[in-house]
Amino acid sequence: MDILGTLGVLGDFALTKVLPFIVVLTIVVFFHELGHFAVARWNRVKVDAFAVGFGPELIGRTDKHGTRWKLCAIPLGGYVRFLGDANEASAPDAHALEGMTSEELDGAFQNKSVWRRAAVVAAGPIANFILASVIYTGVFVYQGEVTVPAVVGEVTEGAPAQQAGILPGDLITSVEGQDVADFEDVSRLTMISSDQPLAFTVDRDGKSLDFIVAPLMTERKDQFGNTYKVGLIGISSRRGVENFVHRDLGIGEAFVKSIDAIGLIISRTGYFLRDIFLGKQDADQLRGPLGIGQMTSQVATLGIVSLLSLAAALSVSIGLMNLFPIPMLDGGHLVFYAYEAIRGRAASPRAQEIAYRVGLTCVLMMMIFATSNDIARLFSG
């Protein structure tokens, strides 16, 4: 291959594989850190640095408040460093307040009340959820809502639904006491309930019938060949365009639907982690940066709306992950602040130092494990 051909291949790889991932991740990280930054400013905390990415600074500027805004070389995260922080993870520095002037003490993060510190820390994940809601609301307003009535079209031979007695033509009206509006509701309630018997109520020729169906954990493949496991009962909706119902959504309805979408991601994440511990899901489905990058490049081929929806889902996931009670993450900080609020004093510097080291180890181990999954997936694919 000649030089021009090589450059063309590299350019195509950068535009189709790398650029979508960097753009999506940068937007999500920026809004996460902007949440921390905005609430810190409202609470008169001096912000030393606002960084998107890690490692060497590529470009940056210092504003009139003394905050260094910078874009760094490794686009896999970001941080806001406050006056008095020991590092980019906002670990407290036991000696940071010594020798500060009264003006500096007034702007030091560690010198603020526990409630103000908690508000600053919680603002990052909250900003992720707000960003996701804004994106989803826009997507739903643009696309409208497409629903499929919860009428059974086909029943797979030998599947849980067929064994329970559900027949084609049955209208599913409720699952586990929850009213069913469309086929998507049925999927939502069964996909996360593998091997757990569920109470189905159906309307068959005007008669209400009850069945007990246990979804079976089944491995499926998406359109890109990625494998995943979901609970299925072996039914499908009626085929044909005439069975699809489309309606436009106003901003209010779209906003409510965006909250439902965020709640669905959070609940599915919880069920997924639960099933990993129960052995129903494989831990090799966890994705690291390479896996997320691959998924982003795949979704980017479907268009801007699909890419925006992925950005919203990724924003929810990052916000949720940061709330895990692991030192180094926002959730770990909130645990320390809860302890301080209850006991009336902060944990000892030594205890916090040990906790942050353990947290760092946990985060690094999770990153290494997820990245090893990504590499194995790339080679096997």
Image (cartoon, helix red, strand yellow):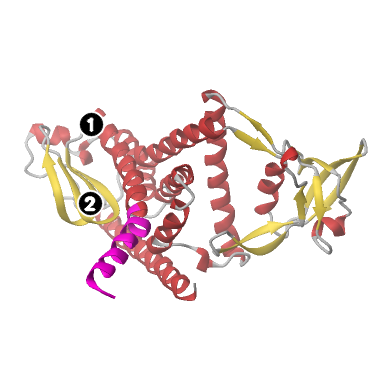
**Dot label at residue 41:** 1
The chief SS type of the magenta part is helix
At x 57% / y 37%, what residue is drawn? 260
At x 44% / y 71%, what residue is drawn? 378
At x 38% / y 60%, what residue is drawn? 289
Q: Amino acid at mark 1?
A: Arg
Q: Which residue is mark 2?
A: 88
Q: Is residue 52 above or below residue 368?
A: above
Mark 1 packing: few (<14 Cα in 10 Å), some, or many (20+)?
Answer: few
Q: Amino acid at mark 2?
A: Glu
- What secondary structure is found at the residue carrying circle 1? helix
Q: Is residue 295 above or below residue 38?
A: below
Depth order, front residue of 299/82:
299
Mark 2 packing: few (<14 Cα in 10 Å), some, or many (20+)?
Answer: some
Depth order, front residue of 12/26:
12
Magenta part of the protein: which range? 1-19
Per the model, the C-alpha gap separating discs 2 and 1 is 17 Å
Q: Any magenta on residue 16?
A: yes
- What secondary structure is found at the residue carrying circle 2? loop
